[in-house]
Image (cartoon, rainbow, N blue to C red):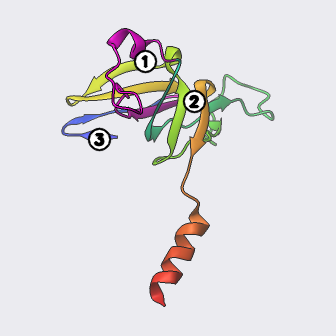
Amino acid sequence: MKKGNSRMIVVGDRVLIKPNESEDRTEVGLYLPQTVVEKEKVQSGTVVFVGPGIPIPDPTDDEPWRPNEKGPRYIPVQAKEGDVAVFLKKHAIEMKFDGEDYLIVPQGAILVLLRDDEFSKLDEDFANLE
């Protein structure tokens, strides 16, 4: 991810998330105190960037001290850019990058990913053609 002259690289199985606005009201419109909002155990946000995944060694490598021409291999992260992630709030690390708030969350802390179905987008495109 690049902003201005700075470049951010997400490493390992971590996911960079833009947090959704926290709900500070009940369904009937009552404002909740900050202490109640902070006690929530889960939070949601939009996935902005993902790391490459968990690095794994080459099982055929008999001499690990020699340079590897193949490059690193990874077990990929399930999250994709644009997904909405519901995650455990206690595992999130808050940070600011170019004046915007983000959360760095390990893949293991993500409970659910909400993704637009690619096939439903195709159906909408075909419906618009008619």
Q: Do the residues labelled 1 and 3 touch (CB within 8 Å)?
A: no
Measured along the vertical axis of the image, is residue 36 above or below residue 82? Answer: above
Q: Is tag 3's residue or tag 2's residue first in the polypeptide sequence?
A: 3
Q: In this view, does 37 lie to the left or right of 117?
A: left
In the image, residue 11 lies at what x, y percent?
Answer: 49, 29
Residue bearing the label numbered 1: 93
Q: Residue furthest bottom?
A: 130
**Magenta region:** 11-40
From this view, report whether residue 42 is shown above or below residue 78: above
**Three-letter amino acid code at the position of disc 2:** Asp
Q: Does residue 79 belong to the magenta stretch?
A: no
> Is the residue marked by circle 1 packed among few (<14), some (14-19), or many (20+) residues within 10 Å?
few
**Residue 13, which numbered label?**
2
The percent coordinates of residue 89 (x first, y second) are 49, 19
Q: Residue at x 71, y 24 (%)?
A: 64
Helix, strand or loop at disc 3?
strand
Return the residue found at the far front: 28
35 or 114, nearer to the observer: 35
Q: Which of marks 1 and 3 is in front?
A: 1
Horizontal and vertical percent position of residue 85: 52, 37
Q: Which mark is residue 36?
A: none
Residue for badge 3:
2
Identify the mark nearer the N-term, 1 or 3: 3
Is 14 within the magenta? yes
User: Gap in Å between the C-alphas at discs 2 and 1?
Assistant: 14 Å
- Residues packed near mark 3 inside 10 Å, few (<14), some (14 to 19) or many (20 plus): few
Which residue: 37% across, 19% down?
A: 94
Q: How far apart are marks 3 and 2 (CA)?
A: 19 Å
Q: In which quarter of the image is residue 36?
A: top left
